[in-house]
Amino acid sequence: HVQLVESGGGSVQAGGSLRLSCTASGFTFDVAAMGWFRQAPGNECELVSTISSDGSTYYADSVKGRFTISRDNAKNTPYLQLNSLQTEDTAMYYCKRGETRGQGTQVTVS
């Protein structure tokens, strides 16, 4: 079955950086589109970024120019590099494939 396990979150000061990872299993990773979402308390889940099997990417306007999504098909892992973090980026970040998401990793910016 599909499993997604996020890691790399943490607490950083504004302007700092983090790199999120998502170890994927249970499906053919290299042909799958992957996405990163986030949800802050009291807010709806927000699409942050996606990467297709051919490497095409999408970014929400709120993170464009600051976040970078990538994937390593040999490791079955998508990444999300978070730079120039702002307090508004504080949220639980989830990796998603189709309707399946992981348990999330918390990013807190102060």
Image (cartoon, grey):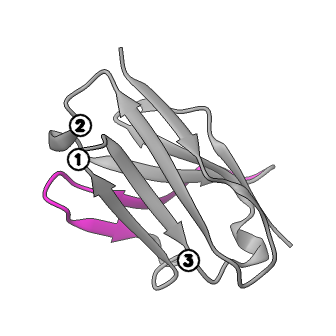
Instruction: Reply yes or no: does residue 38 show up in magenta.
Output: no
Name the residue located 55 percent from the left edge and 41 percent from the top edge.
6
Tag of residue 62: 3
Name the residue located 74 percent from the left edge and 72 percent from the top edge.
88
Give, as a three-letter code, the residue at label 2. Answer: Phe
Residue 35 versus residue 5: which sits nearer the camera? 5
Q: Residues within 10 Å of mark 2 (few under 14, many from 20)?
A: many
Instruction: Tell me the element at label 2.
Output: helix
Instruction: Reply yes or no: does residue 45 show up in magenta.
Output: yes
- Which of disc 1 and disc 3 is earlier in sequence? 3
Name the residue located 52 percent from the left edge and 34 percent from the top edge.
5
Q: Relative to 33, does residue 19 appear above or below in the rendering?
A: below
- Which of disc 2 and disc 3 is earlier in sequence? 2
Tag of residue 29: 2
Where the C terminus falls, by quadrant? bottom right
* Side (left or right) of 3 relative to 10: left
Toward which corner of the image does residue 18 lie, by quadrant? bottom right
Toward which corner of the image does residue 26 lie, by quadrant? top left
Q: Residues within 10 Å of mark 1 (few under 14, many from 20)?
A: some
- What span is colored magenta in the figure? 42-59
Name the residue located 19 percent from the left edge and 30 percent from the top edge.
28
| Callout 3 touching callout 2 (CB < 8 Å) | no
Residue 21 versus residue 104: which sits nearer the camera? 21
Q: Position of residue 13 (x, y in %)?
A: 81, 77
Where the N terminus falls, by quadrant? top left
Give, as a three-letter code, the residue at label 1. Answer: Asn
Tag of residue 50: none
Tag of residue 73: 1
- Which of disc 2 and disc 1 is earlier in sequence? 2
